[in-house]
Image (spheres, rainbow, N blue to C red):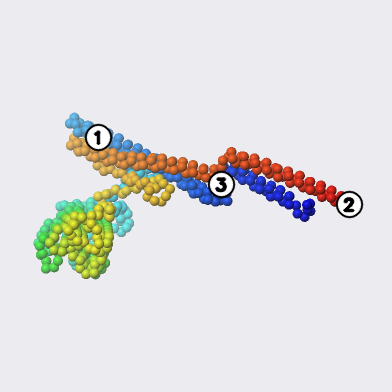
């Protein structure tokens, strides 16, 4: 049949030509890109898989760069330590030379001069070693033994801030003349030969501010036969910060006074970043830092290492309260103790605690601990002796031995209407009546969470509720005490492609040295030898840690390379084009396209001739 309106053969040829053209275009695209999957329509499932593989490969490439930079950083750190080690080795040679009796004064001075220069260079290396602007050895040491690092104010800065500058013992004593003043220390002050009169009294309170500025008040003698002894006698709504009271001394006398290294009595005060060392003896309310803490107020980042001993007799008709940090906290206001601790041994007749002797009404003790041994007769606790009336103890622990007669507990001797969470007692507790691994006696509607634990040292003692035994203290708390005076410099190397801990390698690059080496004579030279050996041992230990971290990073780098290789191979299998196959397809489609075009042209000419022949026949 010959049709004028519908040419089926031509339509077939056109469709075939279009298909051949699409096939040819696909072949050209695959040859030019190198991929057999260029769009989701090519293979939806494999396109998705290939895209994810591509993302992972890209991430691994970046992780590979990260690890390489980490290796460079560690190399820089280790090379810096090698320099310090070489200086110390030379100083050791100088110390051996100086220890010999053949060196005269001039020779010793020359040795001391070279030693001093090398020490300065070691300090410079520690302070200035950097990688890409990052300090490698943080080298930033807290001033003194404060929990918080102290940013010392210069004298000009202090004056601009409205402070009265204190440089001598007389100027410190002169605070008595203006109890509302704002004071700041500019020197360490030694009170060894000074008859100290506590600032303020029961009728005239200290209401100002005292900023220790990171300096220490040393050898505070509180033997004066008077009531309420401390650096300050009475303070109200005052502020105490960055104060160190070192080697405080007080002996037992016949006065029933309150005693604390910083203050005998405070009310509504803010006490921050203060500490005390030494020993305190009393016959009444006494604490390593504060004797009595009344009503509202806060104490943060404070501690005491003082042994606090009160006579083991009941001299008062009332109660004696003795604690390693604070004797007693009482009143109607809300007082808060946060991030504080005490390490001294504590002894008293009653209401005696490693941290606080007695706490009453809305007191909150958080993130604090006591390490000293506690001895008494009644209401004896590793952390608090007696605590009552809606007080809280959260995330605290005690570890010292606790010995008493009645109401003896590893954490608290008596707990009345107490709310406790996340606490721990690792104390060996001994007593005769009302003795507990956590609490000796629990009175009223107290709530003790199941996150409170006690150690297996007291298998025969009961705790409260469903508490567990045998828990390692370090698994629950990770406190940092001021003995760790260096600020860490944690570097986290991202050695993987995920956000989890398995993809990171962390290292504390912190490294500081106490470069207090003196070589001035044969005796000091011999002492310097031991000191230098300690420093070299510390460097060797750090080098070992850095070397181990370097090996870990090298291993991570190799593992990343293996992952990249495997993922690249998998991606190639899925998405790469077989050029030989695509080339053959290209030629085939090209031939088919040309054949279709030729047939279409020939077919049209043939049909046109046939139609014209028929028309001519009709005309004849």
Rendered residue at 20%/68% (across/down): 443
Residue 271 visible, this angle: no
State the residue position of label 3: 37
Drawn side of residue 158 relative to residue 279, left or right: right
Q: CA distance from mark 2 to mark 3?
A: 60 Å
Drawn side of residue 253 relative to residue 86, left or right: left
Few, some or many residues within 10 Å of mark 2 (<14, 14–19, 20+): few
State the residue position of label 1: 92
Nearer the N terminus, badge 1 or badge 3?
Answer: 3
Q: CA distance from mark 1 to mark 3?
A: 69 Å
Drawn side of residue 398 relative to residue 24, left or right: left
Q: Are marks 1 and 3 in contact (CB under 8 Å)?
A: no
Rendered residue at 27%/34% (across/down): 89
State the residue position of label 2: 619
Nearer the N terminus, badge 2 or badge 3?
Answer: 3
Few, some or many residues within 10 Å of mark 3 (<14, 14–19, 20+): many
């Amino acid at each position: 049949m010959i049709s004028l309106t519908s040419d089926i053969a031509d339509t077939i040829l056109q469709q075939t030509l279009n298909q051949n053209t699409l096939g040819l275009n696909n072949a050209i695209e695959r040859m030019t890109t190198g991929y057999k999957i260029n769009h989701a329509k090519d293979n939806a499932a494999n396109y998705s898989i290939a895209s994810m593989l591509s993302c992972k490969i890209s991430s691994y490439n970046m992780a590979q760069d990260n690890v390489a930079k980490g290796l460079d950083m560690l190399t820089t750190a280790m090379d810096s330590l090698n320099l310090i080690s070489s200086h110390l080795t030379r100083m050791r040679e100088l110390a051996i030379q100086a220890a010999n009796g053949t060196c005269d004064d001039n020779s010793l001075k020359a040795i001391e001069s070279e030693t001093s220069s090398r020490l300065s260079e070691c300090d410079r290396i520690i302070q200035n070693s950097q990688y890409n602007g990052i300090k490698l050895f943080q080298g930033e040491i807290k001033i003194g033994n404060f929990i918080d690092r102290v940013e010392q104010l210069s004298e000009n800065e202090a004056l601009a801030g409205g402070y009265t500058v204190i440089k001598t013992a007389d100027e410190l004593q002169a605070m008595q003349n203006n109890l509302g003043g704002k004071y700041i220390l500019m020197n360490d002050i030694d009170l060894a030969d000074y008859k100290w009169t506590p600032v303020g009294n029961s009728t005239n309170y200290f209401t100002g501010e005292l900023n220790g500025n990171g300096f220490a008040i040393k050898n505070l003698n509180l033997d004066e036969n008077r009531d309420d002894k401390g650096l300050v006698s009475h303070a109200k709504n005052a502020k105490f910060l960055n104060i160190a009271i070192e080697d405080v001394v007080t002996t037992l006398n016949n006065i029933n006074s309150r005693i604390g290294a910083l203050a005998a009595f405070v009310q509504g005060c803010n006490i921050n970043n203060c500490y005390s060392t030494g020993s305190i003896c009393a016959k009444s309310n006494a604490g390593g830092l504060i004797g009595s803490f009344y009503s509202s107020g806060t104490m943060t980042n404070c501690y005491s290492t003082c042994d606090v001993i009160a006579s083991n007799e009941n001299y008062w008709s009332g109660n004696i309260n003795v604690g390693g940090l604070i004797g007693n906290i009482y009143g109607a206001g809300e007082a808060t103790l946060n991030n504080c601790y005490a390490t001294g041994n504590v002894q008293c007749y009653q209401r005696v605690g490693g941290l606080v002797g007695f706490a009453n009404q809305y007191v909150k003790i958080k993130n604090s601990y006591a390490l000293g041994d506690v001895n008494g007769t009644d209401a004896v606790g590793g952390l608090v002796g007696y605590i009552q009336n809606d007080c809280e103890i959260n995330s605290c622990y005690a570890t010292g031995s606790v010995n008493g007669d009645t109401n003896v507990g590893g954490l608290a001797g008596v707990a009345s209407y107490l709310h406790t969470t996340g606490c721990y007692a690792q104390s060996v507790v001994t007593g005769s009546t009302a003795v507990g691994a956590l609490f000796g006696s629990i009175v009223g509607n107290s709530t003790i969470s199941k996150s409170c634990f006690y150690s297996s040292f007291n298998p025969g003692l009961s705790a409260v509720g469903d508490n567990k035994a045998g828990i390692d203290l370090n698994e629950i708390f990770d406190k940092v005490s001021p003995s760790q005076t260096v600020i860490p410099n944690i570097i986290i190397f991202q050695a993987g492609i995920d956000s989890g801990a398995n993809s990171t390698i962390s290292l504390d690059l912190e490294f500081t040295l106490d470069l207090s080496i003196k070589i001035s004579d044969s005796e000091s030279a011999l002492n310097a030898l031991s000191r230098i050996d300690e420093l070299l041992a510390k460097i060797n230990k750090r080098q070992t840690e850095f070397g181990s971290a370097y090996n870990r990073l090298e291993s991570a780098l190799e593992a990343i390379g293996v992952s990249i290789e495997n993922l690249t191979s998998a991606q190639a299998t899925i998405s790469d084009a077989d050029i030989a196959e695509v080339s053959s397809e290209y030629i085939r489609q090209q031939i088919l396209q040309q054949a279709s075009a030729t047939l279409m042209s020939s077919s049209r000419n043939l049909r046109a001739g046939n139609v014209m022949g028929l028309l001519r026949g009709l005309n004849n």
